[in-house]
Amino acid sequence: MSARKIRVMVAKPGLDGHDRGARILARCFRDAGFEVIYTGCHQTPEQVVAAAIQEDVDLVGLSCLSGAHRVLFPRVVDLLREKNASDITVIGGGIIPEQDFQMLYDAGIKAIFTPGASLDSIVDWIRTNIQGRD
Amino acid sequence: METTKKICAGDVRSASRLIRDLEDKLPQARPRLKQLFPHTGKSFIIGITGAPGAGKSTLTDALISEFRKQKRTVGVLAVDPTSPFSGGAILGDRVRMLRHAEDEGVFIRSLATRGALGGLSQAAGDAIHVMEAMGKDVVIVETVGIGQQELDIIHHAHSVIVVLVPGMGDEIQTMKAGIMEIADVFAINKADRPGAKQLQTELASLLNTSALPPSAWRAPVVSIGNLYEPAGFAEQTAELAQKISEHHAHLLISGQLALRMERKALMEITDALKACILEPVLNKLIASGELKNITQRVKNREADPYTEAETIARRFLKSGEIS
Ligand code: B12
Ligand SMILES: Nc1nc2c(ncn2[C@@H]2O[C@H](COP(=O)(O)OP(=O)(O)OP(=O)(O)O)[C@@H](O)[C@H]2O)c(=O)[nH]1
Ligand SMILES: [Mg+2]
């Protein structure tokens, strides 16, 4: 019958105002055929998680270029777990030094993309890892 | 059964999942909706419509605050367009409503049109029911930015708010049929902009010179100025909420609420017939490849569409093949 439409959310937690990348991603996801909830800048992890649950997204993509990812990204994963919503996948991107990758993976972030990552590679990752969730 | 209980208890996860199942037309969605139906029909449903960028989401955000002050719970369905090229969509109405994200009394859900042309999505009516079953006192439905024709909202909402903005060219343009006729309340938004006074005057004179409609309700006009002057903006949006409540009261007292609900029930049964008869027939014809052949025959003028449709109707209705 009908296949599920992939729903993703692109969010920018914290005080970081670099939204160019997030906007480009939102458009790229739309062009890939996904439904994208775009929530703009300056959100608390609590707001991100509440919105993700109300929108029933498959994936939350966090963008952070300010350096606060070490705190904000794990917080989002933790709050999702608290709300029994660990089935929602969390990935991230932005200015993230390589030495932080392992710490973020351990915290439950499933993939990380940094400047120069091709949009195709991001879409492919989502198609490979998200389809099939029911 | 489990899902029904959870949704009626207000569980957001179950509700948003069911809305998604309905959008994706999963087979398990319909039985669940049937179970929910007895619990629906008690919410007050407000439609907000108007041109793209008119300020529908911003006003929705302000109205949420007003209703929350009255301790009423609120559901919001915000519809944005699906790209006809990719089938994807950017759903951005929520950005204007972020301050309500964590309020447990507010449930905001974005919907993509997925090809529907009436300003809503096909699942919108069912999604309204899910929010009603959750016990939301008020459900606000924001349509996509519309022109003059996408008026499906009147079949779903009890009160329709039409948002107008100054500077859309010849103001009389806006007085045409369609969008102007469906308004129960007008909001002139961005009234801080040039041309607002003129729009206000023309609208007022148009409304005052036309005959009182059979509903005996003359749509009031509320001007809403600069969003960035919070004091004035709050006062004006409070007035908007007040006018909406007055319209609700009018619907109740005049007995027109019952009429509108009847109109809605008729629309729902019509839609359900399409979903139960037309859709499965089309699906079968597509799957068997017949639709392609018929299309070719009609294109080549070897057959006419009515004869073909009658043949199909006879076949499926008799055989009971539809299900
Ligand atoms: C443009 C820019 C700005 C613009 C932002 C405009 C805007 N609205 O976005 C302006 C001029 C406003 C600006 C301001 C500042 N900036 Co600036 N800025 C940049 C710059 C040059 C490019 C960023 C960009 O837009 N890239 C293009 C987009 C498409 O790339 P991207 O966002 O990285 O996204 C890609 C990947 O990272 C990944 N990705 C990103 N997010 C996500 C999310 C998901 C889910 C996924 C899957 C992938 C993904 O995918 C994208 C495609 O490959 C960077 C330097 C750099 N080379 O990155 C500095 C940079 C980010 N800025 C920096 C700084 C310090 C600032 C300021 C604090 C400067 C100041 N002192 O005032 C301010 C702060 C602004 C604020 N409010 O937060 C630093 C940050 C340092 C740090 N993190 O340690 C950088 C790294 C410059 C530097 N080398 O020092 N900045
Ligand atoms: N000056 C002024 N700007 C406003 C007012 N209300 C909204 N805006 C701005 O108008 C723009 C569009 O507002 P939205 O609320 O997103 O409009 P919308 O009708 O929901 O837009 P779509 O959903 O895209 O059709 C935003 O930049 C708002 O900040 C107002 O009263 N005055
Ligand atoms: Mg909007």
Image: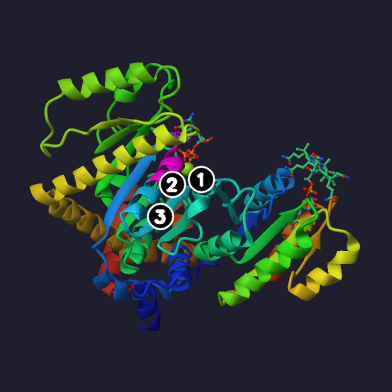
Secondary element at tag 1: helix
Q: Is residue B1 in view from this perspective?
A: yes
Residue A121 position within the rendered picture, expressed as x and y whole percent measured from the top left: 79, 58
Disc sitting over residue B61 in the figure: 2
Q: Chain of mark 3?
A: B
Q: Chain of mark 2?
A: B
Q: Is mark 1 within 8 Å of ligand 2?
A: yes
- Same chain for marks 1 and 3? yes
- Same chain for marks 2 and 3? yes
Left or right of B53? Residue B308 is left
Residue at the disc numbered 1: B96
The stretch drawn in magenta includes residue B55: yes
Disc sitting over residue B76 in the figure: 3
Please give the name of the residue rendered at 23% of the width and 46% of the height, measured from the top-left corner. Answer: B245
Q: Chain of mark 1?
A: B
Q: Is mark 2 within 8 Å of ligand 2?
A: yes
Image marks 2 and 1: residues in contact by CB distance under 8 Å = yes
